[in-house]
Image (cartoon, rainbow, N blue to C red):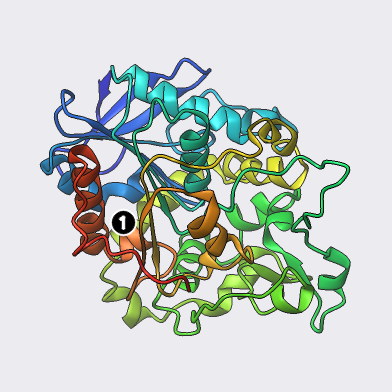
Amino acid sequence: MKIESPYPSSALEPDIHSHRIDNGNGLMCHVLEAGNPGNPCVLLLHGFPELAYSWRKVMLPLARAGFHVLAPDQRGYGRTTGSDNRYDGDVASFRLFNLVRDAMGVLFAFGHAKAASVVGHDFGSAVAAWCAVIRPDVFNSVVLMSAPFAGTPPVPLPDSTAVKATIDHDALAALVPPRKHYQWYYSTPEANANMQHCPQGLMAFLRAYYHHKSADWENNKPYSLQSWSADCLGRLPTYYVMHQAAGMAETVAPEMPGAAFIENHHWLPDRELAIYASEFTRTGFQGGLNWYRCGTDGKDHAELQTFSGLSIDIPSLFIAGASDWGIHQKPGSFELMQGTSCTNMLGCHLIDGAGHWVQQEQPDRVTALLCSFLKGVQSDRIDNSILNKEIKK
């Protein structure tokens, strides 16, 4: 059902439309749509703390390239309703298996039995990866952005010599200064209020948060970490491995850019940032934070072990900003993705001038890579001048 856009009239191009649809999995989803419904579908899945709106800069170019483009507010976000977003609510409904079911429900609600591709950014990259693992018959290709896919979890066999990647929280706390991992902080009862009701105000919090993780923050110079040791993880910026006594609001506040910088901001001006601030003021962050809790408390792990030993075998692409520490926040994942987890990876691209918000910071470059990949997959001819697989970094 097409609806009036929930955003100000200037927020979206006229050819991007808002819908409310029943996804068949308990949600009434708010979905942004562009392009001809008769064309092959591309499904875009956002991350944290984002919205369908995060895809605004790439939707019309993809539609003009011949695709039907759908971008939902995912479970717990924005104008999508029906999920239990309380801290003490139904956390299990946010596990990855169910998020894949959500994504398929959006696809089916618009009349598509298959998708040309599922594209995911940040936590949406994990959902896209599991769409590719679980239903390669539905999704013809997959694009992962900013968050590498390390593979399906191993089954702990008696003779297994595999070493499980684990975080030693006591060792992090023993660092000087003491540190803690952001995903476990996001799993605490106080995380939502710390961000939603922070002293600096939500608009200022989001400005500092997005700035801190972007290429605009000059200290984002990522490199591969050798292990999961506290010493290695402690080298990550504080938005990933936080000071133990600080919440996220206090973590990003010192990185707030100046007024002149904000006034001339090119990829996220205040009028666009205000969309995020308005939505998260209304909903809070707890719906998105519940996604993290399924990982930190193990709700995901046993179910996903059902797919142990499987890889992503459909055509895949990886895109991230060259200044994005997200590539390396899980040591070894970037290398595993290129080596074993994705057996048909046709390109791995780190874009200069972009940090974590790559499709917003460098939309033209992202759009060029997506269009070349998607058209190549459709015709089985990949333009290697654009999709030149890079050396592992």
Q: Is residue 60 above or below residue 338?
A: above
Please name whichever residue, 8 or 120, is drawn nearer the observer in this view of the structure: 120
Q: Within 10 Å of the Cα at label 1, are there few (<14), some (14-19), or many (20+) other Cα atoms?
A: some
Q: Is residue 268 left or right of residue 286?
A: left
Q: Is residue 156 above or below residue 330?
A: above
Quarter of the image that includes the N terminus? top left
Frontmost residue, 307 versus 236:
307
The residue at 41%/72% (across/down) is: 391
Q: In the displayed structure, does residue 24 sit left or right of residue 112? A: right
Could you tell me which secondary element the residue under label 1 belongs to?
helix
Residue in the foreground of this view, choosing between 3 and 378: 378
Q: Which residue is mark 1?
A: 272
Instruction: Say if residue 107 shows up in the picture.
Output: yes
- The residue located at (26%, 76%) in the rendering is 264
In the image, residue 217 above or below residue 130: below
Q: Nearer the viewer, residue 264 or 352?
A: 352
Residue 173 rendering spot, x and y as whole percentages:
85, 72
Q: Quadrant of residue 273?
A: bottom left
Amino acid type at image mark 1: Glu
Q: Residue visible at 54% across and 42% down?
A: 311
Q: Name above or below for residue 267 compared with residue 90.
A: below
**Looking at the picture, how far across and down is residue 20, in whole percent?**
35, 23
Point 45% across, 79% down: residue: 217
Residue 340: x and y, percent?
Answer: 54, 53
